């Protein structure tokens, strides 16, 4: 049986007790791309409300704001005299809503992202134009389309939402931002210009694999930045071997293995603290950097009494 035979419909609603007792109803690409210790903390120990309200790195919010700008251009900017300008303003508006959450070095990062967002939106739209996003489909494209997949041997569904979806293909948009460099001998720090990748990141390939098999459509993976005009790169099955179905199947099998291990752990555990007995944390990982001191102390309490 192939993964194409495991496309889920909305009738798969049964959730085993060992999932429901920790209030986990499904897996997602975002969950599967996290290390086990971070997944345990973010999705088992914490709840959905915490995840929706947590303050992320400014780069994450900048990526979300850029996506908001692209979506605005697609659906609402046709009412404006300057659609592109309106989309950029909307993206900046959404990003500025997060400004009060950042202090110190994160405030500096926010300022840098704020300068780059308008061009980032423009480059994202230019990339979509290059793949004929606005002209090929006779059906109006949709944003953040939910899709589901049932992995072999896994008792809950995997659910995600594409960034953009047409009748012909799905699109994943990823952004890259400047980061603070190492401290120099004179005590100053510069900003590193992040280059566009030569090939897709592994985590993004796994996401694309899920969307390919869940939608039964090819996927375009677009990286775009705000560094300069034309700073974007498009990966698809015709220019990247790793975006072909054969390799994407390999990536999806990785998700299946991650879910199998976690399902087995959930079966023998009755609580987040008991589950933590079988998972070694790595608090040196960057995944923990966005937690407040209080949240970090609570996280450590899962493993250290």
Image (cartoon, rainbow, N blue to C red):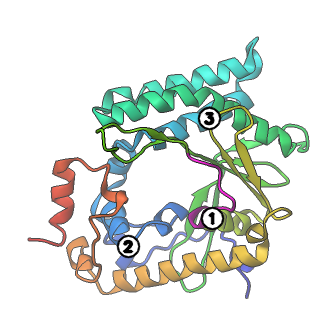
Q: Which residue is mark 1?
A: 148
Residue ID for mark 3: 227
Label 2: state its secondary structure.
helix
Disc number lying in front (3 or 1): 3
> Considering only vertical position in the picture, is 214 above or below 132?
below
Distance Cα–Cα, label 1 vs label 2: 22 Å
Which residue lies at the image location 57% right of the left edge and 79% below the top edge?
Answer: 254
Return the disc, 1 or 2, that comes first in the chain's sequence: 2
When asked about the image quadrant of residue 78, the answer is top right
Residue 26 in sight: no
- Comparing 269 with 20, the one in front is 269
15 shown above or below 153:
above
Q: Which residue lies under the disc numbered 2?
A: 36
Q: Residues within 10 Å of mark 3 (few under 14, many from 20)?
A: many
Q: Secondary structure at mark 3?
A: loop
Looking at the image, is mark 3 or mark 1 earlier in the sequence? 1
Q: Residue at x 52, y 64 (%)?
A: 28
The location of residue 131, given as percent across then percent down, is 84, 46
Q: Earlier in the sequence, mark 2 or mark 3?
A: 2
List the single residue furthest toward the front. 185
Residue range (magenta): 194-205
Q: Is residue 95 left or right of residue 73?
A: left
What secondary structure is found at the residue carrying circle 1? strand
Q: Residue 240 got which mark?
A: none
Q: Mark 2 touching mark 3, by CB under 8 A? A: no
What residue sits 31% from the left and 53% below the top?
289
Q: Position of residue 30 (x, y in %)?
A: 50, 61
Q: What percent of the width, then of the height, locates residue 156? A: 51, 74
């Amino acid at each position: 049986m192939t993964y194409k035979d495991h496309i889920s419909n909305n009738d798969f609603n049964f959730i085993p007790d060992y999932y429901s007792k920790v209030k986990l109803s499904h897996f997602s690409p975002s969950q599967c791309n996290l290390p086990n210790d971070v997944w345990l903390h973010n999705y088992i120990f914490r709840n959905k409300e915490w995840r929706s309200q947590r303050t992320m790195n400014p780069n994450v919010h900048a990526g979300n704001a850029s996506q908001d700008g692209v979506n605005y251009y697609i659906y609402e900017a046709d009412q404006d005299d300057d659609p592109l300008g309106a989309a950029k303003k909307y993206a900046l508006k959404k990003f500025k809503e997060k400004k009060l959450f950042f202090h110190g070095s994160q405030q500096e990062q926010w300022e840098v992202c704020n300068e780059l967002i308008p061009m980032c939106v423009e480059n994202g739209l230019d990339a979509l134009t290059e793949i004929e996003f606005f002209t090929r489909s006779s059906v109006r494209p949709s944003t953040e389309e939910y899709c589901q997949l049932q992995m072999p041997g896994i008792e809950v569904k995997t659910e995600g939402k594409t960034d953009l979806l047409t009748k012909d293909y799905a699109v994943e948009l990823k952004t890259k931002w400047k980061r603070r460099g190492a401290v120099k001998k004179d005590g100053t720090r510069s900003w590193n210009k992040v280059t566009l990748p030569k090939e897709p990141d592994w985590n993004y390939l796994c996401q694309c694999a899920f969307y390919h098999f869940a939608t039964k459509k090819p996927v375009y993976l677009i990286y775009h930045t705000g560094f300069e005009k034309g700073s974007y790169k498009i990966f698809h099955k015709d220019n990247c071997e790793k975006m072909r179905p054969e390799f994407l199947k390999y990536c999806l099998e990785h998700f299946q293995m991650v879910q199998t291990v976690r399902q087995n752990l959930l079966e023998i555990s009755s609580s987040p603290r008991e589950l933590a007995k079988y998972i070694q944390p790595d608090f040196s990982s960057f995944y923990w950097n966005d937690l407040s001191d209080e949240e970090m102390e609570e996280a450590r309490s899962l493993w250290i009494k």
